[in-house]
Amino acid sequence: MSASTSPLPRGTLSRPTGLDQPLDVSGMVDPDGGLIDRRIFADQQVYQQEMRRIFARSWLFIAHEDQLQKPGDFFQTYMGEDPVIATMNKKREYRVLLNNCRHRGARVCRADYGKTKNFTCTYHGWAYDLDGNLSNVPAQDSYPDTFNPADWGLVTAPRVESYKGLIFANWDADAEPLADALGDMKWYIDAFMDRDPEGTCVVGGVTKWVLEGNWKLAAEQFATDWYHVNMSHASALMVMSPTGKGPKKEIAQRSGKQYTDDHGNGAGFPVHPRNRFDAQPVHEYYDYDFLRERLSPEQVTGPLTNGHATVFPNFSYLPVNGSIRVWHPKGPNRMEVWSWTVLDKSMPEDVRRAQRLYNLRTFGPSGIFEQDDGENWSECQANAHAFMVGNTALNYQMGIGTEQENPGYPGTTSELYSDAAGRGLYRRWRELMSTPAWHEA
Ligand code: FES
Ligand SMILES: [Fe+2]
């Protein structure tokens, strides 16, 4: 269709090179020394480079498989700031289409989710099938002979893969397989997503809310931060306590592990033989011997219940709450949080209800823990742009030197109270931000 050498569908168009000039941000994070430059949370140019070099080539969470069960089912979401439609085509394959008409650029789908045979743009009527092919153009005979609808389909993510019900997509055709990008993190994910031989489902739709705060503040916290729990959530823990007296000492001073890897993924969890689900009907439902057998004893005493995790860059989850979420970037100062409730498919109705209500009570926009977290992120963001604040380094030094291999725990682990996974996340961030992406050929 064009003489352009760009792998992006730009036809014969070209741009002055200065427009997307990359910044050398390698000095803004020091993962070995545990220092971060505040400007990475507030700078528009850094943010634009994140869109080009992180979000345009990382595996990004799209939807749970439960949301796309039949051909024509669709769900609208974002990859970075790009609107996309996830759908299942007639061959029952997942497709992720850029939700942007090739004519003038309106979204071709404006519903959050649903079922359809095609996506018809409501501006001039161009219509696209479930694979994104341009299938109808009103008054097509008014276009020149050189106009070929086959050249004007929706831009399609070349890679869509899923793991244990979680669908991810990648704009980079040559990206390593999702399973490789998850690496040892799969073992930790399994403790949440593979408890039930029947698999998982999502219930209650997607809860969405906007927060003032850079997307990395949330991703980083879910990767690495158990440290804040006793302080930030003190009042919430008191409310949740049966006696109303606040957390007992052994809860407040837990020991556990943190997982970090060179892909920027991270997870943290207390390790205790009596780790359990907090919602009583859920706790009573589970056969922990069966889970030890199906998974491993280490998964049951560790990441199966309490804990936190982030799959780089912006997908996070909480096993005990059954919460999965995406931190959609909306400019350097804002994120939109989308959260789902995940349940094991075999759970009977009363257990489902208990787990769903427990998740709503603790996380989500009205959750007593979630509100504490959101306040913290907005607080950290509020002055990040200011001159003196922006020139003062942040400390990520907790647990430096504790990273090690640990029998029973795949990959590299550190202590529960540690910034190891945070340093790992920013190490990956620096690596991607410093390396040209596929579209910069
Ligand atoms: S913008 Fe979609 S048909 Fe014109
Ligand atoms: Fe928290």
Image (spheres, rainbow, N blue to C red):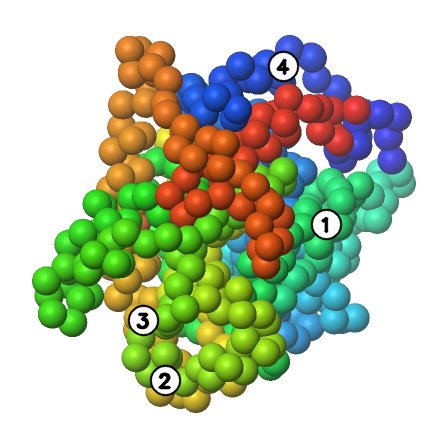
- The residue located at (72%, 50%) in the rendering is 180
Confirm or reject: label 3 Cβ below 8 Å from ligand 2.
no
Quarter holding the C terminus? Answer: top right
Describe residue 219's horizontal placement relative to residue 120 as left or right. Answer: left
Q: Earlier in the sequence, mark 2 or mark 1?
A: 1
**Which residue does the numbered mark 3 point to in the structure image?**
278
- Callout 1–callout 3 Cβ contact below 8 Å: no
Q: Position of residue 411 (x, y in %)?
A: 62, 48
- Say which residue label 1 marks: 180
Q: Residue furthest front?
A: 407
The residue identified by callout 2 is 284
Q: Which residue is mark 4?
A: 21
Task: State the separation of the CA atoms marked 2 and 4.
Answer: 57 Å
Of label 3 and label 2, which has the lower sequence position? 3
Pair 4/1: label in front: 1
The three-letter amino acid code for the residue at tag 3 is Asp
Q: How much space separates mark 1 and mark 3, taking CA atoms?
A: 33 Å
Q: Are marks 3 and 4 in contact (CB under 8 Å)?
A: no
Q: Alpha carbon of mark 4 to alpha carbon of mark 1: how far?
A: 30 Å
Give the percent coordinates (x, y) of residue 141: 81, 48
Left or right for 350, reference 411: left
Residue at the spot x=67%, y=54% of the render?
96
Badge 3 crowding class, 10 Å Cα cut-off, few under 14, some 14 to 19, many 20 or more, is: some
Residue 333 visible somewhere in the drawing: yes
